[in-house]
Amino acid sequence: MSESNQTTPTFDLFGLDERILDALADLGFEQPTPIQAAALPALLEGRDMIGRARTGSGKTAAFGLPLLQRVREGGNKPRALVLSPTRELAKQIGEALADYGGGLRSVRGVTIYGGAPYPPQIKALKRGASVVVGTPGRVIDLLDGGSLDLSELEMFVLDEADEMLSMGFYEDVSKILSLIPEGGQYLLFSATVSDEVKRLVSRFLKDPVDLYLSTDMDQVEGIT
Ligand code: AMP
């Protein structure tokens, strides 16, 4: 995506699992995008993050690669949850994670969203899912119905937080956050970070790394 130069790192500098590196090579990802280069080291260290970046910046891999690295040993109960405002975006994220983590045999991902029948999603969760991508309404329905168990969750990603709020999901996201065990890694991605977005997540974020991606998506402007 970005021009090659001497300061641009390559993916193999981050200590990612070989199977993830192989998947990136197969996809033709030669260099991390600016948001990936800035986010990967901090996220692999377990830091929380506010990433001001929009679709097209490569943000899915920025959070997806650390997420996959972290859950690579699998497990039956979900260890990572990515919340997305729309079904289309949820599906895109689910597919991207399947691409990046295709070599990780023990990592199972399930995407859950409204407007689709419940039984296949319930069945998929019952088979065991270490990574769940979902829209807020369906996540709550499946939590309430007992099919989704977040008691072992270690990583939570709120994607497109501003969209989430403009679509009226404040209460739903608050409820989901209240059901997640403390001490996990929390990430927030949003094109803009309003006071309302901050209010939603400030209780949960611990000393987050704050990344500002410049509008031309060429460089990351601020890291704290
Ligand atoms: P995203 O912002 O995550 O939706 O990604 C935008 C597009 O860029 C997607 O089609 C990705 O497959 C692609 N992409 C993400 N990271 C890279 C990379 N490091 N190199 C090349 N393409 C990438």
Image (tube, rainbow, N blue to C red):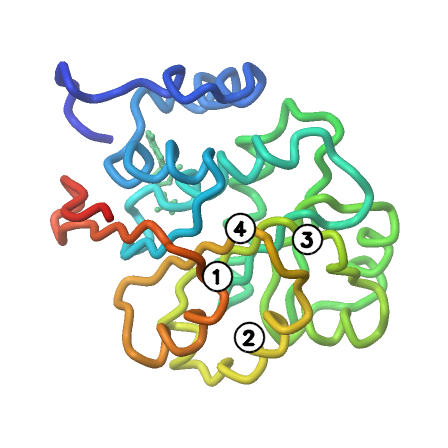
Q: Earlier in the sequence, mark 4 or mark 1?
A: 1
- Mark 1 touches mark 2? (CB < 8 Å): yes
In percent of width and height, residue 17 lies at 55, 19
**Residue in the image at 74% along x and 52% along y:** 152
Mark 2 within 8 Å of ligand 1, using the beta carbon: no
According to the picture, the residue beneath numbered tag 4 turns out to be 185
Q: Secondary structure at mark 4?
A: strand
186 to 145, vertically: above or below: above
Rendered position, 104 above or below 110: above
Q: Residues within 10 Å of mark 3 (few under 14, many from 20)?
A: many
Of marks 1 and 3, the one in the foreground: 3
Residue at left offset 63%, top offset 72%: 176
Query: In 3D space, how far apart are the residues under numbered discs 4 and 2 (Cα atoms)?
Result: 16 Å
Find residue 153 and name its label. Answer: 3
Residue 158: mark: 1
Element type where label 2 sits in the image = helix
